[in-house]
Amino acid sequence: MAYGRHFLFVPGPSNVPERVLRAMDRAMVDHRSSAFPAFTREILSGLKELARTTEGQPFVFSATGTGAWEAALSNTLSPGDAVLAPRFGMFSQLWITLAERLGLEVRVIEQEWGEAASADKVEEALHHDKARAIKAVLLVHNETSTGVTSDIGAMRAALDKYDHPALLCVDGVSSIGALEFRMDDWGVDLAITGSQKGLMLPPGLGIVWASTRAVAAQAQAEIRRAYFRFDDMAASNEGGYFPYTPPLSLLYGLREVLQMLLAEGHEAIQARHARLAEGVRRAVKAWGLELCARSKGIASNTVTAVRVPDGIDAAAAIDIAFRRYDLSLGGGLGKVAGKVFRIGTMGDINELMVLGAVAGAEMALRDVGVRISPGSGVAAAMEYYRSIDPAAD
Amino acid sequence: MAYGRHFLFVPGPSNVPERVLRAMDRAMVDHRSSAFPAFTREILSGLKELARTTEGQPFVFSATGTGAWEAALSNTLSPGDAVLAPRFGMFSQLWITLAERLGLEVRVIEQEWGEAASADKVEEALHHDKARAIKAVLLVHNETSTGVTSDIGAMRAALDKYDHPALLCVDGVSSIGALEFRMDDWGVDLAITGSQKGLMLPPGLGIVWASTRAVAAQAQAEIRRAYFRFDDMAASNEGGYFPYTPPLSLLYGLREVLQMLLAEGHEAIQARHARLAEGVRRAVKAWGLELCARSKGIASNTVTAVRVPDGIDAAAAIDIAFRRYDLSLGGGLGKVAGKVFRIGTMGDINELMVLGAVAGAEMALRDVGVRISPGSGVAAAMEYYRSIDPAAD
Amino acid sequence: MAYGRHFLFVPGPSNVPERVLRAMDRAMVDHRSSAFPAFTREILSGLKELARTTEGQPFVFSATGTGAWEAALSNTLSPGDAVLAPRFGMFSQLWITLAERLGLEVRVIEQEWGEAASADKVEEALHHDKARAIKAVLLVHNETSTGVTSDIGAMRAALDKYDHPALLCVDGVSSIGALEFRMDDWGVDLAITGSQKGLMLPPGLGIVWASTRAVAAQAQAEIRRAYFRFDDMAASNEGGYFPYTPPLSLLYGLREVLQMLLAEGHEAIQARHARLAEGVRRAVKAWGLELCARSKGIASNTVTAVRVPDGIDAAAAIDIAFRRYDLSLGGGLGKVAGKVFRIGTMGDINELMVLGAVAGAEMALRDVGVRISPGSGVAAAMEYYRSIDPAAD
Amino acid sequence: MAYGRHFLFVPGPSNVPERVLRAMDRAMVDHRSSAFPAFTREILSGLKELARTTEGQPFVFSATGTGAWEAALSNTLSPGDAVLAPRFGMFSQLWITLAERLGLEVRVIEQEWGEAASADKVEEALHHDKARAIKAVLLVHNETSTGVTSDIGAMRAALDKYDHPALLCVDGVSSIGALEFRMDDWGVDLAITGSQKGLMLPPGLGIVWASTRAVAAQAQAEIRRAYFRFDDMAASNEGGYFPYTPPLSLLYGLREVLQMLLAEGHEAIQARHARLAEGVRRAVKAWGLELCARSKGIASNTVTAVRVPDGIDAAAAIDIAFRRYDLSLGGGLGKVAGKVFRIGTMGDINELMVLGAVAGAEMALRDVGVRISPGSGVAAAMEYYRSIDPAAD
């Protein structure tokens, strides 16, 4: 018999606001009626503002972020095309695998997990690509597995330095709607996200924004595509419709989320995530533990990956947190499995929820033998939150 | 722009489980259809089990606990009747006022706020009532204003000692569905509750259970009554209906709550509330503050009233908690206004929610100048929760 | 296994709009927080506009319409006071019984069920009341049992003609929020409604509007009252609060309903109900059946009571409609039990829903042997709806 | 200001039961927790029972039916493979287009729109395929654009007659969960559906069931696939998980729907759809209009496509129905655009809802000049519904 709200602090799905759940809890409508286009247009317009783009064209698929990865690549590239991709965590790795399955030749820049994507190495690779064989650069903006945010503006600068025409493809799955993301300013050609992270929705939407260049690339792109087609989607969206029955509940939720986020404003959104995550980092420091992120400046404000001491199994702590304290933490993936646990700070959460989660993590860590001074993490986070004024946001 | 769940830790309304909100979120039905009686009967039967009575008859009114107070008295007593009532907190005081408004002569036993109702003093008063003028004893089982639980069994013993026929009337508003409550074993004649405390529902139901003696008392009872009539209600309930349109949404919620609570079982319910409240008390002790309850044994498991140090305004801390930390704490009422704050631990909450609330209270207390070692309260509660096994419940 | 929406066409509870259900489906809040008064004030202000009053003071009780009846009388009258009341249906009868239980001396004007309240007979009674013994006139604006709407303005004129000081008490349970209701213009002193009719909410709110004279009458009123006290409610409402925990879910729903209705406007609301009910009346006429209402001008736009032919049991038709066609119709009450069935046209309904209900009623009537030309009722209602333009509302 | 339930009678999305909406209206969970596999397994097990298969393996994608089409083909075929496909409506045409986009060589059997897929022509084509070049036969079980149901068992017989190894691929989008569908008995290799038709869910799930042969075909299949991979999905599902964040809300809804449908039973489900659709057909006949389906035996029980008289624009009637009567009807697609309108009878509907929709269609048809005797269609449907006993289901 379980009472109380489960503390969902995985880095996705995030907590859905009650208001958004209510917006989704409604009867279906005819998606071909004359009333529908106004709804479609409100969503598409809001999505542009969310990614800070005026020319970028948003495409909303019934899919996950993985589907959006595929949509981005298959509509713009051809089998055999070379793409450049730093590999520095689980999601960069998975995207590389997907690109290979689509027939792309992926030139991988290997980096340590916990580092940010290296603009220097990308620049170097582009510098040597005299033949302009590289058609796209794939970058994970916020590597959810290690809690690391990379500098997309620096990547654009690297491309610009050599006037390189490769498409700048950015996985913004755990950044868009939460971290600073400037599609136009950064010259992003393909931006990608899912619904269940910063957008605070249930999973089920894969969203791609394509720049004018990316849209134009369809003409040459020869990867076979059927479900994920920009052209069909664009043709239907033009009239305010979708080429096949769109996921209505999620779209109603998306409209509500866009209204909330755009009313809040980009700076306030970023400050909110920064504040919540900083509380977590203060707790980690007070516990005497290390972040997975190799340097402070790259630590993500949407997910904090924490290394456990040698000899401790992070998975055991996560399981105790789940079963005993009603707290879901993210596990370590791939290379860092068992070595890290992750605390997501996206979605509908506030300071006291974070403090409850920090308390739960601390209890679970102590249960598996990590030597932590009781209450130290919570105290550090509390004092940080007291030092600022959340009510002012 | 507010994100995250508000931490509602007032002693009512309590947090409503998502499952119960969903059960209430439904279309209306015809309350006079042939399908309705089965629904009514399920609820009435569950209410009997909840109060641990086989003979007691439950009456569900569209009202609050205040309305249920009136229903209990007006159906069983006559203007001018003497009733005995200890006054030891805000709710005993309000009930006394209501009884006086109904024309009853209330013989008040004055006690300190923070004490439990004194069985000795009740016994003494009954002993002197040779003429059996006292027709009822009014007891608040759990005084929500001071966080004190009284011993109803001892009151029954006092009545039995002198074979006194007075009706034993018990306000179980913040006890039934949370604390031990044994209507039949304790010989309670009128038990009273509302929907918004242990029953975890929105406010709007006033519930009275009447013993056979209380039901029989209607025949002589001369307080004028119209809306709150046991006879009309019983006559309609007999057939599975209500004398006027019942509050359907709340009844659907009540059915769900009864299913949850009865599946959990009385002992588990009590243990759950004891565990959550004990964590709060550990925090209070670690803060170096005092409970409003004068002795440990009478401290309530549904609401903890905490005295703030002299010179500190509890209301200021409560307001900061609300505005700055998204936490609702209960304020001091009547004699203890400004001197106490209260933390309710009824309804749909769990350990991490309590820890978040404790953290929020600690921050607010520090904000208004209470000298508390940062994290001390949370640490004490955490270590207590770690020492037991909530997952075993 | 039941699929599809049940057709709820009883005259209350009415169908709750999905939007209102969603507004109610939310977490509880602290009703004593500093944020609460704004919410209270929005509701009270909207209620005044709804009843078209500037001086009238609304009181919202957790109760049903029956409770609101009691509140209206007990706060303004004293035991032994004479009140005048036409009896012409079940609800006027029930109100009379309630008044008697409160100790009032009810001077009943007997009328046929199916007639409207007679302003002539009221006037005559007032004329003979030289001693001004009559302290109040109790009128059911829309008698839900017979589907008859009475002329309240004419009642005011009767009072004014003799400058009679009796309070004009109007049961607006099935009229306010649906039919024309002008508290100030008609000089209504006490207006009463419940939540589950024109207000399209679940049952659970009893609402009374009191004129300045009615509010002042409290000072002399000696009916004992405790739960239903205007003074306590007014004192708390003054600050934006309630004297006891208010029924939060229903209040959230009420706010939403008020926003909907006031945005729609009084004239549009009345036109909507007139249009829907006229469709039903066209069907009844096409069936060759009679209304319970004795003349066309008094037929209610919120509920249509239909007489079945002699030898037919209306209850049997209603039961078939419920079990076989998933349609709830209202039954005949009191004197007209078995002789009439009723179709409510309040709440969240539209033309096609009415047509479905008319079709269901027709099937059930044919099933019990009423000779009706198949499709005749639906055809008449359809042609009526086609002749007007609902989209223009 | 719109009141009442919109009458949604398009052939998808269908009406979602209130119970299912409630099941979806809940907080997110960690899809990687130890509690999740039991949930996954309940769904997969229920899906097998729904399609009447013991060996077939269900795959649930966050996608629409179009995505499920792609998943079915891309996991089992290679570019250049020949597939056989009758084209007899919009959805068979769209699937053919999709197959071509995936690089398949589609051998199209052209048929009139309104006919069922011809087993004879399929058989003939297979007969001539001595080289066994045809790797798959693509059949739309229920052509939603024309309201025609084809005989899948006859197709299996055709394949068996020549012992042809082609995979039998069946689009069951508007049949599974509503019409008879026997995956094992009919030897279906790939069955496909979406969530928003017979499954009564919002759009957003694309579901494929693959036979052992189809699963094995992956080994040779060379169509590039990344998002829609059976192997990744099967590997994760094996442990009770998903390879990427699954669409949790829809999965919660799916579990609820499966519980409803499987408790109802296949025969009852089919009888329900047959009954509702027959009422519509009786109305169409009474109106004097023709079905799009060329013969009675092939008329679909999930969608009825109705031809309007020459000179009438079906789209105009549909638009009037939407704007004036709050009724959504399906439009004509492709070759029959403007010539037909469609009434879907899937999802959460009942007899009175169908009668309301029939009434609305009749009003709209009369509004655009179709000469129909008022009430004739409704009367015919009513008399049909009266002749059977829906309560017995």
Image (cartoon, coloured by chain):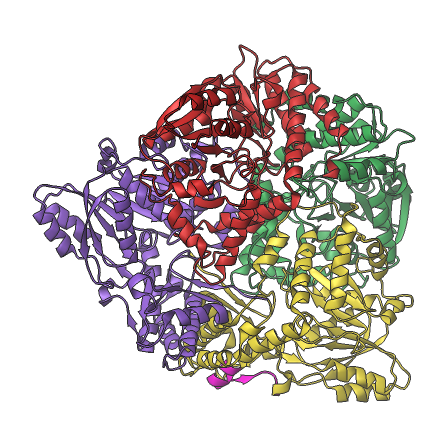
Chain colours: A yellow, B purple, C red, D green
When the figure is inspected, residue C92 is found, relative to residue A196, above or below; the finding is above
Camera-side residue: D213 or D340?
D340
Quadrant into which the N terminus of chain A falls: bottom left
Q: Is residue A102 visible?
A: no
Q: Is residue D314 magenta?
A: no
Q: Is residue B6 left or right of residue D295?
A: left
Residue at coordinates 66% horizontally, 18% vertically from top-left? Answer: C285
Rendered image quadrant of residue D367: top right
Camera-side residue: D247 or B308?
B308
> Residue D306, image x and y in percent?
82, 32
> Residue D340, image x and y in percent?
84, 35
Q: Is residue C232 visible?
A: yes
Q: Is residue D190 left or right of residue B285?
A: right
Q: Is residue A288 magenta?
A: yes
Camera-side residue: A217 or B209?
B209
> Residue A183, image x and y in percent?
77, 74
> Residue C227, image x and y in percent?
35, 44
Rendered image quadrant of residue D215: bottom right
* Residue reaching furthest to the top: C311
Magenta span of residues: A282-295
Q: Is residue B184 left or right of residue D89?
A: left
